[in-house]
Image (spheres, rainbow, N blue to C red):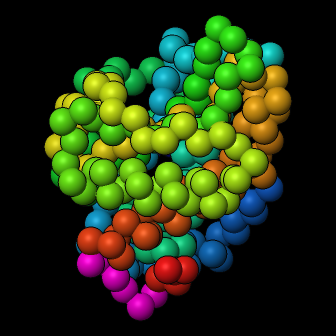
Amino acid sequence: MPGVGDCSICTYDPENNQKCPGYSGIQLKEKQISLLHRPSDFDQIVWIDAGHGGKDNGAEYGFLSEDNVNLGIAFYLDYEFCFVGIETCMTRMKDEYVSLEQRATEANIKKADLFISIHCDAFHKETARGMTVHIAENHSQKALILAKAIDRQLGLQFPEHQHREIKKSNFYVLTKTKMPAVLIECEFLSNPETRNFLRKAENQRSLAKTICEGVKQYLIKIGFNRSSIEVKL
C-alpha cells in the first residue's frame, strides 16, 4: 500500500485488486477502477489525517483503539470524496506511526487546499459525550467557514448526539498547516454508549458521508460550485 502523503481520486490497490480495510462491506471490482479514478471535478486537494497510529494508539476503551476508528472513518471519507471527484491525500493508510510534524509538513509540501483531521474524544468521566469541531485560535476565515459547514451537517445528521460547538484549540496540525484546517472529534470512546456507536462500520461511514457533505457545502459557500455536485441548500 502507498505510504504517507500518497494521493488519488480513490484509495484502492488495483495491483492486488484489494478494497481498503476501512471499507467494510464495500466490494470494489477491477472493472470499476476506471469509474473510481475518473478526472477530478475540482482543482482541490483534501488532506485526510487519521489521528494517531502505530505505537500511538490514542484513547483505548472497551477493547477499541482510537487509531483504528480514526483510520476506518478516514477510509470511508476518502471513498466519499472519490464519488464527488475531489482528490485526496491520506496521512496514513495502515496502522503506522506518523509524527505530528510530518503530518503538517507533508500536507504543506503537497499544497493541499483543506486539512481534515479525524479523532475520537475521551474524558475521565464516562458520561461525557458529543461531537466537536476544532479550529486553531489564530484561524483563517475559510477555516471558520469550513468548521461551521461540517458542524452544521453533524448537527443535522446526528441530532440525537450532543454537539459541543466549534472550539478554538492550538493542536499542532491546526497551527502548523498552511491551509484551512479542522480537527473533528467524532464522539467519546470513554462513554460506553457512544463507544458502541463508533465501533459500528455503518456509523463510521455515516460520519464520513456527513463530513464530506460539510466540505461540499463549504466549497459552495466560497464559490467553488460545479454542476456535478448535488447539494441541499
Residue 124 image point, x, y percent: 65, 8
Residue 165 image point, x, y percent: 49, 41
Residue 21 image point, x, y percent: 67, 44
Using the rendered image of the protein, determine whether residue 62 is visible from the camera's viewpoint: yes
Using the rendered image of the protein, determine whether residue 205 is visible from the camera's viewpoint: no
Q: Which residue is painted at 39% across and 51% down in the image?
A: 147
| Side (left or right) of 123 relative to 10 | right
Q: Which residue is painted at 61% across and 19% down in the image?
A: 122
Residue at far top of view? 124
Vertical order, 136 against 15 (above or below): above
Residue 36 image point, x, y percent: 54, 72
Q: Which residue is painted at 40% across and 35% down in the image?
A: 167
Q: Nearer the viewer, residue 141 or 184?
A: 141
- On the image, which quarter does residue 129 sit in? top right
Magenta part of the protein: which range? 223-228
| Side (left or right) of 204 relative to 14 | right
Q: Main secondary structure of the magenta part?
A: loop
Q: Nearer the viewer, residue 14 or 81?
A: 81
- On the image, which quarter does residue 25 sit in? bottom right
